[in-house]
Amino acid sequence: MTTKTEALEGLLEICDQIRDLQEDSLRDSGSRLRGSGKAEETVARVRVLREAVFAELPALAGQPAAKALSDAELLLLALLFHRRISGRSEGLRGGELVSLLTQAGFSRGKALAALDREAALRHGSWLAVRTDSRRHDPLDLRFEPTAMAMDLFMPAVPVPLTDAPEAPPDQPFRSEEEYFWDLLRWRNLCIQRAEALFEGEWPASAPSQRLVDAGREARAAHLRLRARLGATKGSSEYVLESFRREHQLGTDHMLLVMHLLFSETLEGESFLAASECLRLISDQRTDLFLKRRIVGPRGRLRREGTVLAGDDGSEHARAMAHDLYLAEWAVESLLAGLHRRPALEDRDFEDLARGE
């Protein structure tokens, strides 16, 4: 990760993985999980959080008090931030936070110590505690991030590229259909990034300005999308979000799935070259080599049958030679949320009362 936006997105993805591991363990699938390597992969990513993620977040790097926090304490705050931006306004009980940190590879003793009354997180005003007079055990207390803690992870406001008026604050989605079309906008910006990926001489020249701008716009669109989800009550119940959690899809997986869906249903292109799909999920040139597995036969999407290949029966076919398409059951699942009615807001009822 080389930029603050990539670092923030990577941090949210790690929190997604930790949450998915926790949900799997609650379904008594621990043995299957260990065999899949998902837990080991997540723990390995957590080990380099300090250098690869936390050091790239400007608000966190510029806060002396935050620099003194341990990796476990910073990850605990990040998990609470992730919960808030995922659309859940209430905090987490201490027992659940300990369990999440344990999934990330920290000992239960270290996780418990982070929640102690005299610990840096509570003594330094990073955590707010919600409880009643009958509950004093840290495992029973409900913890919420303070405004100071939230500011550590909030993306900095980018400098506008033009003199366009300031964008309005992020508004909640009124329906899953509105979220669906926002995903289309994000996917289209990623297509522009993919088109700019091959400009310039390789490998000597630096990435073109067009690629830099396209990458920045695509990442900003995805962060705005996540922020709108976080502001939307009940967004965790969206079919698209349930599909993402059930199949444990990261950002690249979800982008690839939606690209195949939009290509088939809107543009009439049911089969897409694996190399095209790889370019779409690549934010920089080296990703073309580092992300091959995602579109290959050993990647999760094809291994679980969400994405199929036209020549999967050919034992010796090369991974990038496949044409990919979305399984029909996946198409039906992803489109199921469009049948829901949009949520009415207070202003809608006021308009109805006036006969408008």
Image (tube, rainbow, N blue to C red):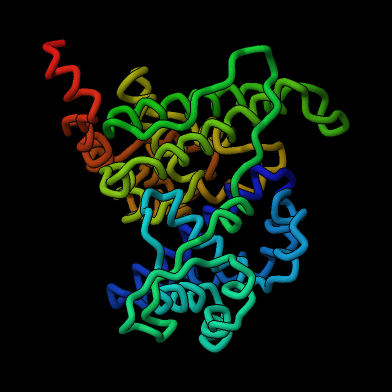
Residue 166 as seen in the image, left or right of residue 300: right
Residue at (65% x, 31% y) in the render = 216
Q: Residue 266 vs residue 224: left or right?
A: left
Give the image location of residue 355, x and y in percent. Answer: 11, 11
Quarter of the figure with the C terminus: top left
Q: Is residue 169 above or below residue 105?
A: above
> Count the marks: how many?
0
Q: Residue at x 40, y 31 (%)?
A: 171
Q: In the rendering, at what x and y percent does residue 143 appear?
A: 44, 69
Percent across and percent down for residue 114 are 57, 79
Q: Along the horizontal axis of the image, is 71 left or right of 347?
A: right
The furthest residue to the right:
204
Q: Residue at x 53, y 31 (%)?
A: 221
Front residue of 257/295: it is 257
How far from the left and from the top, in percent, is residue 27?
Answer: 28, 73
The image quadrant of residue 279 is top right
Vertically, is 67 above or below 182? Answer: below
Q: Quadrant of residue 283?
A: top right
**In this picture, is 245 found above or below 173?**
below
- Give the residue drawn at x 43%, y 57%: 83
Task: Work out which residue is located at the far bottom of the displayed protein and give it.
Answer: 109
Point out the residue furthest to the front here: 133
Q: Is residue 70 above or below residue 77?
A: below
| Residue 245 seen by the camera | yes
Can residue 35 be seen?
no
